[in-house]
Image (spheres, helix red, strand yellow):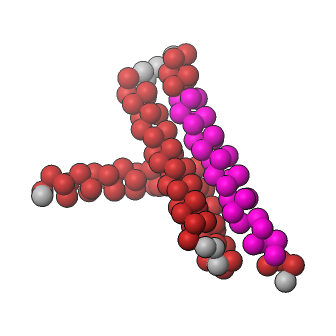
Amino acid sequence: MYHRVMSFRHAFAGLAHVARTQTNARIHLVAAAVVVVLGARLGLPARDWALVALCIGLVLAAEAMNTAVEAVVDLASPDVHPLARVAKDAAAGAVLLTAMAAAAVGLLVLGPPLAAWLRG
């Protein structure tokens, strides 16, 4: 039981580090909060909430993985190296792709009810 508790503690410490040190992660957290508030205001159905939750989780997980890749690359290659740049750029690209997909889902899920709400 102790090891299980400690593994959760380490996981939450990692997430806290990402939120504390990564500007883009904080931007994604604010965007997620805006989407959650907007979704609640619009009364999204459960199916749409599942999509929203999945997208938020995937973007934040991608951001955490990007932070981990950057840390490992910095440890392994403190000097500027072309392969280090490739690893960091690819990890950042994964975050970008995930965020773009989440934005598309957000538009599809929130767009119609938001348009209806704005029309009154």
Q: Quadrant of the C terminus?
A: bottom right
Is residue 100 something that shows in the picture?
yes
Drawn side of residue 59 relative to residue 38, left or right: left
Quarter occupied by residue 93:
top right
Q: Is residue 89 magenta?
A: yes
Above-or-below relation of 116 to 31: below
Q: Nearer the viewer, residue 120 or 37?
A: 120
Residue positioned most to the bottom: 120
Residue at the spot 53% in from the left edge and 29% down from the top edge: 88
Residue at the spot 44% in from the left edge and 33% down from the top edge: 69
Residue positioned most to the right: 119
Q: Nearer the viewer, residue 109 or 18?
A: 109
Residue interval drawn in magenta = 88-116
Pinpoint residue 6: horizontal percent, then vertical percent: 20, 54
Drawn side of residue 120 relative to residue 23, left or right: right
Q: Is residue 74 magenta?
A: no
Quarter occupied by residue 39:
bottom right
Q: Nearer the viewer, residue 86 or 106?
A: 106
Residue at the spot 37% in from the left edge and 28% down from the top edge: 75
Q: Nearer the viewer, residue 57 or 11?
A: 57
Pinpoint residue 35: horizontal percent, then vertical percent: 63, 66
Pinpoint residue 14: horizontal percent, then vertical percent: 36, 50
Q: Quadrant of the N terminus?
A: bottom left
**Magenta span: chief secondary structure:** helix
Residue at the spot 54% in from the left edge and 63% down from the top edge: 50
Is residue 29 something that shows in the picture?
no
Drawn side of residue 68 relative to residue 5, left or right: right
Above-or-below relation of 77 to 104: above
